[in-house]
Image: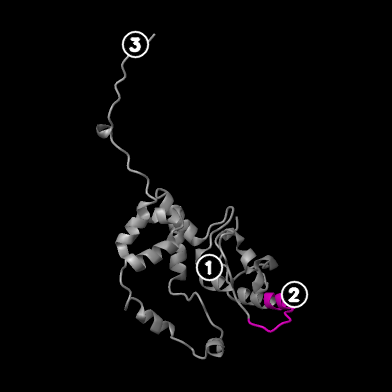
Amino acid sequence: MVGIHTPIASFFCRPPPLPLHDLQVDLFRRWQSAALRAGFEGQLSEQAFNLQDASTVNTYVTKMGTEYVWNAEHELIRAHSKRGSISSMTPFDMLRAYMDTPDDVRPLALFAEYAHTFHGRRQLVWSDGLKRQLLGTDGLTDEQVAASVGESDPILARIPLEDWHIINLHKLQGQVLQIVHEYGEQGLKHLLGAYRPPPRLSNAFCPRQHLTGSAR
């Protein structure tokens, strides 16, 4: 059992040709040195450090499923939406596990540990000067972005937990965003109505069939 570990994806912009092997050796040594300075003890395995060109990132996350198109930009900003494979679980897999079986609080405790550890951390960090070099501007600061949250974000719909289970089961997240944006909460109810199981009739509304005849 490996335990909890946090993968970090770093992207480097370099002109070809790309000497992957030499970069792998050099960057692993730098990463190992930084990890030891941060307090990690023992020999760090090279299996924990992997360098590849961005063309292979789609196969790297095939555990997402072949119906997904996963590119370098997704690895940068949507890593939280990946799911574990075989016996592994991502933090949000743990949260989903708790939602499916609320009696088992262990996944919730692990997710709470993850949320507490990463609260306030930045998901995406630019190298110094790279944003200005690529985009011509440094953009908004983290403080400006945080201060603008909620300024013009109206609540389009409120989704009960049982409806969220239906959305996850049928992978309707994209349709839900589009429907509530265009038609609001009533449009969402209409969409989910097609996926709800039919209501069960009670015995009081079920006509009884009276059979006549004699048994032989």
| Residues under numbered marks 1 and 3 in contact, where contact means CB atoms less than 8 Å apart | no
Q: Which quadrant: the C terminus?
A: top left
Horizontal and vertical percent position of residue 214: 34, 11
What color scheme is it?
one colour
Badge 2 amino acid: His
- Is 108 within the magenta? no
Residue drawn at (66%, 71%) of the image:
55
Q: Which mark is nearer the camera, 1 or 3? A: 3
Is residue 45 or residue 13 the one in the foreground? 13
Judged left or right of residue 141, residue 8 is right
Q: Is residue 168 visible?
A: yes
Residue drawn at (57%, 58%) of the image:
65
Horizontal and vertical percent position of residue 36: 62, 74
Q: Which quadrant: the N terminus?
A: bottom right
Residue 47 lies, with reference to residue 106, above or below; the image says below
Q: In the orientation shown, which residue stands out farthest toward the front?
A: 213
| Residues under numbered marks 2 and 3 in contact, where contact means CB atoms less than 8 Å apart | no
Horizontal and vertical percent position of residue 161: 35, 55
Residue drawn at (45%, 53%) of the image:
169
Lower sequence index among marks 1 and 3: 1
Q: Which residue is mark 1?
A: 79
Judged left or right of residue 15, residue 10 is left
Looking at the rendered structure, the secondary structure element under dot 3 is loop
Is residue 71 or residue 115 the one in the foreground? 71
Looking at the rendered structure, the secondary structure element under dot 2 is helix
Q: Which mark is nearer the camera, 2 or 3? A: 3
Which of the 4 quarters of the picture holds residue 49? bottom right
Q: Which residue is mark 2?
A: 21
Q: Which residue is mark 3?
A: 214
Magenta span of residues: 13-28
